Image: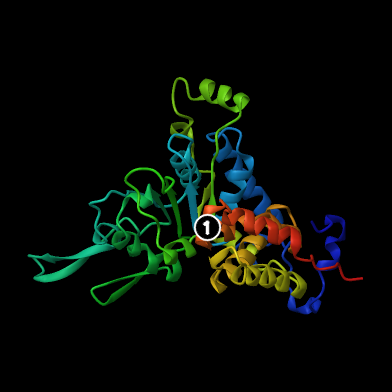
Amino acid sequence: MAVGTHGESFMETDPPASRPASRSAAGRGGPGPGLDGLAEVANRIRDAVESVIEGKPSVVRLALTVLLAEGHLLIEDVPGVGKTMLAKALARSVDCSVRRIQFTPDLLPSDITGVSAYNQELREFEFKPGPVFANIVVGDEINRASPKTQSALLECMEERQVTVDGTTYPLEPPFMVISTQNPVEMEGTYALPEAQRDRFTARISMGYPDPAAEMDMLETHGEESPLDRLKPVAHAADVRDLIEVVRRQHVSTAVRQYAIDLVSATRSHPDLRLGASPRATLQLVRAARAYAALDDRDYVLPDDVQDLAVPVLAHRLLPTPEAQVERRRPEQVVTDLVERLPVPSPRK
């Protein structure tokens, strides 16, 4: 890992005049809320989600990182560990439009994007928006729908727009898809296409809670769900402001090159038949900006890239048949690359 005390060496590799003042506390009419405002709002959202999700601070932080990085989150795990609860808690903590889609084998693409219906009174077709027209879209068990239906999300996730009958409709920012899926080994699931997985910024697993957290869960969830008591602690406009702060985070040339080297190494690894795409590099750096901002830093360290490498890259990789036989998972490959590749040295 890069040494955090040398973080100042990654701050000023570009001319100072080219870098905005990220810690500005100006209001909405100024350059933005700055890191101080980001920490305040982000902490409120984190505390709200953690009041529902017991004992998973790292999972909650990663979900918040993806939100601020303008990305999409894929939550994969066995049933009953809180995947949908996490998605709903994050959605409810922000006062914005939220729609939920329950993916089933008979779901059609038009059930997601919307459809043009004939209006008898106006004697013309009018567009009826689907549930994807929301700030946060919660897709429950996305891999229970057919690949044809899953592909309905491709355009909106990448381009923030929907095209129906030749007409393009923009999606209002912030826009985030939070999808849950069961492991592909389970009955009634379809593997997500490579193009679909590549559009998710990160994939996380909830895992089983430890005994203490499970005891707390029995106490807090005993009479009523804490999700019912959860109130919004931020507005959509707040999230848009925070995204602007994250965009201004400084990434030195050395850290950008380190991200490129890490992603490029997956494309030639003998255990992989499909490496990470250039989109993966872009989303890794975007996520690292948000991750650094949540640490109250206005610059990115190699540590941020390393911490996010597995959740951002592993789900995009396809192992070779030989690696599958030897049970070499993509997560292990990424971990090995992080340990093997040289970390950029702090500027002297």
Q: Residue 110 falls in which quadrant of the image?
A: bottom left
In this picture, is 104 found above or below 55?
below
Q: Secondary structure at mark 1?
A: helix
The residue shown at (82%, 72%) is: 12
* Residue at numbered disc 1: 315
Name the quarter where the C terminus is drawn.
bottom right
Mark 1 is on which residue type?
A: His
- Residue 20 in view in this figure: no
Q: Residue 238 falls in which quadrant of the image?
A: bottom right
Name the quarter where the N terminus is drawn.
bottom right
- Residue 19 in view in this figure: yes
For mark 1, does the 10 Å Cα neighbourhood hold few (<14), some (14 to 19), or many (20 or more) residues? many
- Figure label count: 1
The residue shown at (35%, 53%) is: 190
The residue shown at (57%, 57%) is: 330
Relative image position of residue 206 (x, y in whole percent): 54, 41
Relative image position of residue 296 (x, y in whole percent): 73, 54
In this picture, is 311 found above or below 123?
above
